[in-house]
Amino acid sequence: MKNVSSVINWLGKLGWGIILYSISLEIGNHISEFNSPKIESRVHLEQLVEEKKKEIGFTGNIELIIDPIGFSSKSYKKDKSYYTIVINKSSLNMAMLNHELYHVYQGHCDNTGPDGIKGFPNKLKYFFYYEPKTIIHTLRNSNH
Ligand SMILES: [Zn+2]
């Protein structure tokens, strides 16, 4: 019985750890969006993506979707060298664009598809490595 209760106790701590970690990621994203310049239109968004691609030397195709009702933005690999970035309208700012572009050109999306991240190990890698790395990058570069 003692072993069972210590396992339950440990799982409880792990659960709280994951919840607190998720909240920290969310806070990091919100801080990077705070005071980040807004992107005014679809044309402006497309121009910015083209400029960034040239600056980085990224040659893949990026489809851009502005989601009028969604709450979170995402990026995924649609095809061989074809990526999709979905940004919800309320987060249409430089920080969010930099965040999603970073995922794309750093190869974080290479094991993703329209249905999300493929496989549990990739989900873990995304959650514990790619996402915090991207948030730190965005915090440093959110205003340009
Ligand atoms: Zn992300």
Image (tube, rainbow, N blue to C red):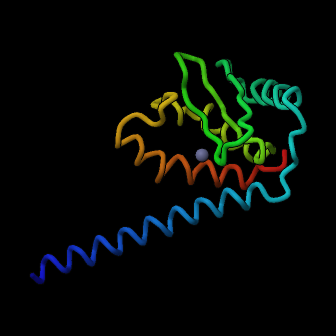
| Position of residue 84 measured from the top left corner of the image (x, y, whole percent) | 63, 27
Q: Residue furthest left?
A: 1
Outermost residue on the top side: it is: 80
Check the image and report above or below for 83 versus 10.
above
On the image, the x and y values in percent for residue 52 come to: 78, 30
Compare residues 117 and 139 and report the one nearer the observer: 117
Examine the image and state in which quarter residue 86 appears.
Answer: top right
Q: Name the residue located 73 percent from the left edge and 45 percent from the top edge.
A: 96
How many circles with numbers are drawn on the protein?
0
Drawn side of residue 20 relative to residue 92, left or right:
left
* 125 to the left or right of 31: left
Residue drawn where x is 66% and y is 39% of the image: 100
Residue shown at 83% from the left, 52% from the top: 36
Q: Residue furthest bottom?
A: 2
Occupied quadrant, residue 121? top left
Relative placement, left or right, of 49 versus 75 is: right
Q: Give the quadrant of the C terminus.
A: top right
Q: Who's the residue at 71% across and 27% down the image?
A: 64
Q: Nearer the viewer, residue 136 or 39?
A: 39
Q: What percent of the width, then of the height, locates residue 126? A: 48, 45
Image quarter in which the N terminus is found? bottom left
The picture places residue 20, in percent across and down from the top left corner, at 50, 69
Reply above or below: 76 against 17: above
